[in-house]
Image: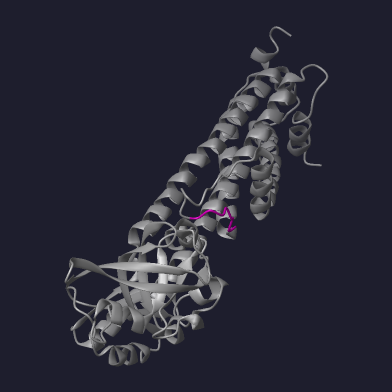
Amino acid sequence: MNLPLFIGLRYTRAKRKNHFISFISLISMAGIAIGVMTVIVVISVMNGFDKELKERMLGSVAHATISAYGHDYIQDWESAIKIAEENPGVVSAAPYVASEAMIQGYRTTGALVQGVSPEYEKNVTQLAEKMKYGSMEDLISGEYNIILGVDLAAQLGTGPGEKVVVYIPQFKTTAVGVLPRLKRFTVVGIFEMGAYEYDAKLALIHLNDAQNLEKTDGGIEGIRIKTTDLMKAPKIAYEIEEKLGGFLRVRDWTQENANFYKATQQERVVMFIILSMIIAVAAFNILSTMVMLVTEKNSDIAILRTLGMSGSQVTRIFIIAGVVIGAIGTIIGTALGLLISFNVSSIISWLEGFFEVDFMSSDVYYISDITADVHSSDVISIVVIAFTLTILATIYPAWRASRIQPAEALRYE
């Protein structure tokens, strides 16, 4: 075996004289393992949060939206849909009418009431796939049926088959004075998107019923567009707007929801940097461990030098000893990080049951489920950073060991 490698490996194990150095080595190894594990788990959870945010938010909203300027309605919306669907990047388009309203069941609360066309809507959003009761096809023109989010239904204290009254902020003059426009609807379905923003605030009615309720004269408020590639939505929106001739406005999801994703990405980068400091602290522990090891092995180094070992060989001995500590810690940390990341949902569920707490309450957080999305590129980056810091931490102690003079080291032996 290569002599520096043989000696370096021996120095990582406990010796007859001083077990303290080996104990510190174990602490350093554990520090690296905990640091690597923590970074992998947190970054994977943030990736999962980002993925869920995109899927849930863009599952109920559009990749792009066509709307009229000001507060006007789009009258010739069939032609606009035809123009949009001619673009090869468009999967489908769906008309809608939206209005903020008050809904009265056993209790009263505010909500966003959207008039949709079931045959169009199922090709654009995931609402049809998220039905817990009923289906989108139950929205029949003229029957004034309504589908509620699961949390909205709970707030209203109502369920399938019961009646609710929808008040919209448009007023009419009657013999008894000015009254808001209202209509009684029958609850025919319940959906659950998994995002509190929609489950507690969104209600669906048929497009024709919404047009009659808001007196749009057959017009619509906008058209939702689903694209083949989410990241190409800005380009596709620009192309559609060009073909529409400037009479209608087209906005993509990056304009509508840009702040959410910018914040998520910035938080991910900042969190990565902050958590990497844990690995850096562990690397400093390795540095201090190697300094103590060099101090303890002064006489051994002096004897090796008198036997003809070169300074570069002494340097390699302590670099190997430090790298072994860092490598073992990195391997253990990576294994634990991946294990926890792949099972984080089960672990959180068990902890919530054991402590009887809800870590991610849907009333507080936009997404109530904790999931992890492990990216191989992130794991590789974390391992490279940990291993690099380990090597850097061994350079100074190894160089110091190579500078030890045999005569000075053995003077008091």
Q: Quadrant of the N terminus?
A: top right
Asked whether the viewer can see residue 191, the reply is yes
Question: Horizontally, is 323 left or right of 248 in the view?
Answer: right
User: Residue at 70% across / 12% down in the picture?
Assistant: 410
The vertical placement of 93 against 5, above or below, is below
- Locate residue 110, reporting x and y percent: 35, 59
Could you tell whether 89 is left or right of 44 in the image? left
Residue nearer the viewer, 106 or 140: 106
Residue 148 at x, y = what percent?
46, 68
> Magenta span covers which residues?
367-374
User: Foreground: 339 or 84?
Assistant: 84
Taking 360 as reference, is 219 left or right? left
Q: Is residue 95 visible?
A: no
Give whichever of 408, 126 is nearer the camera. Answer: 126
Quarter placement of the C terminus: top right
Q: Residue furthest top?
A: 412
